[in-house]
Image (tube, helix red, strand yellow):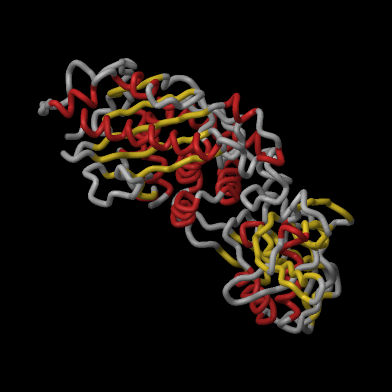
Amino acid sequence: MSQHRTRRFVLGGLGALLAPGLAVAGPPQVSLRPRMRGDELARIAAGGVDALIATSGLSGEVVCAVADVKTGLELEASGGERGLPPASVAKALTALYALEVLGADYRFPTGLLAAGPVQNGVLNGDLILAGGGDPTLTPDDLAVMAADLKKAGVREVRGDFRVYEGALPFVASIDPQQPDHVGYSPAVSGIALNFNRVHFEWRVAGKGYAVSMDARTGKYRPDVAMAQMKVVARSLPIYTYEDLDGVDRWTVASRALGEGGARWLPVRKPGAYAGDVFRTMARSQGIVLKAAKPGVGPAAGAQVLAQHESQPLEPILADMLKYSNNLTAEMVGMTASTAYAGRPDSLAQSGRMMSDWAAQRFGMRGTDMVDHSGLGDASRMTAQDLVGALVAARNEAVLRPLLKPFGLRDAKGRVNGSHPIKVDAKTGTLNFVSGLGGYMTGADGTELAFAIFAADTRQRSRITRAERERPHGAQGWNRRAKQVQQKLIERWGALYGS
C-alpha cells in the first residue's frame, strides 16, 4: 500500500460521514433491510442495550456504539459519547495514524556512521550507532551490522563508540504507575533491542544461585553488563530496581526463585543496552570498541559504514496488533508524530498530537490520548469516536486485514469456530478496564463496525503500585466484562446481521 493510498483512505473517509443515530434503548424502528423477527430475536431485543448492560452486574461504566459499515448509519449506542480508558484498543488508532502519516512501506533505519576518516582500516574518530526508531531491532541485526562494518574495511576504531538514541524522546517507563519489573512497560527511546527487555535466568548452584542477564535470540546469547541481578535472602518484595552508576541494578527474593527459571525484565537504558550488545558483536569480528557513551546527532557529512532497515511498516503493525506490543506502539506512534508535526518533547505530547490528528481526520473530538499503546489509564476515547474512524477506514480496506480474528465462545467458555458471526477486532485489558473495537460480519454478510469500553475507574484507582500485576477482584471483573462484550456482539448480529 503506497503512502498516496493511505492518505486517500482518510480523505475519502471524511466524505463518508457517520450518520448521528440516536442512542436508543431498543432496536431501531426501521431496519436497513427486511429481516425475520422471531421469538429468539424478540428475546434478544427485549429491554434494549441499556438493560443488557444493567443486568450484567458489572461495576463501573460500559459504553458502546455500532454502525453499518456500508452506509455509515449508527444503529445503536449507549453512552457512546462518554470517554473511557481504551486500553490496548488504542493501538488500532495508532495503526491508522502511522499508515496515514508514514505509509505502509515505511522502513525504520539503524545506521553505523563514522565521525572521522577511515584510513588503512583505522577509523580516526568516533563510531556512532544511530537508532532510527526501529521497534523490531534484534541482536541478530546488530551481528549483521558488525559483519558489514568489517566488510567496509574497518578493523580498528581510535575514537569513542557512541550510541545515538535521540531520534525519539526518552521515556523511562511507558506507564510509571506499573511495577518496575513488568516487561510490558520498558523504557522507550530512538533505539530498542529485543523490545527493550533483558533475559534473566537463574538456577541452583551449590548453596546459592547462578544468575545471568543476556540479550538472547534463537542464534545468539550475548551477556550484558548494563543490567545486573543480585539474589537477596527475603520473601518480599520479589524484585527491586535501582539506577546506580549507569547500571540497571536489580535484586530478587531468593524465596521466590525455586529450583530455576527465567523471565524477561524491562530495560531502562536502551542506548546502553544496544551498545553493550553491539560491542560483543563487533568483538566477534575482531573489532574492539570502547564502552558505549551517549551520542549526539550524527554531524552532516558523516560517512555511513553500514545500515540496517526494518521490514515494512504494515507487517510491523500487524504484529503489534496481534501481540499487543506496547513498545512497538510507542515507537511507531512517536515516529509518526515526528513526521506529522515535528519531534515531540515527550510521550504525552506525542499522544496529544495523535489526538489532534484524529480530531481533524475522523472528527474524534472526544478522544484524548496520553500515549500510543493505551497502557496509561489517563487516556480517554469514546465509542462513537472509534466507530466513526473504523467506518471511514473500512471504506479503503485499510485496518481490518491487520486485525486479529476474535473468537466468540460457547456456553462452556470454549472458542466456537462455527459461530455465524465473524469478528476481527483489537482487544484491550487493564485491571478493571476492558475494551474491544473492530468489525463484525453477520450471518447474512452485513458488516458492522463497533466499539465497547468498560471501566471501573474507582476500583482501579485503589490499586497500589505493588498490586498492579494481580489485584484482588480484577480477574473476575475482566472476565464478566468480556461476557458483556460477547452478548452485545450477539445482539447486534441478531438484530442487524441475520
- Closest to the observer: 475 or 149? 475
Quarter of the C terminus within the rendering: top left
Q: Quadrant of residue 439?
A: top left
Q: Quadrant of residue 447?
A: top left
Q: Residue at x 47, y 58 (%)?
A: 312
Q: Quadrant of residue 269?
A: bottom right
Against 182, is 156 above or below?
below
- Closest to the observer: 227 or 53? 53
Against 478, is 307 above or below?
below
* Rendering coords of residue 70 (x, y %): 24, 33
Q: Residue at x 23, y 26 (%)?
A: 44
Is residue 415 visible to us here? yes
- Closest to the observer: 106 or 322? 322
* Rendering coords of residue 132 (x, y %): 63, 56
* Rendering coords of residue 272 (x, y %): 77, 60
284 lies left or right of 66? right
Q: Residue at x 21, y 32 (%)?
A: 494
233 lies left or right of 70? right
**Which residue lies most toward the right here?**
245
* Rendering coords of residue 409 (x, y %): 32, 45
18 lies left or right of 194? left
Is residue 170 visible to us here? no
Number of marks in the rendered image: 0
- Closest to the observer: 234 or 156? 234
Against 108, is 60 above or below?
above
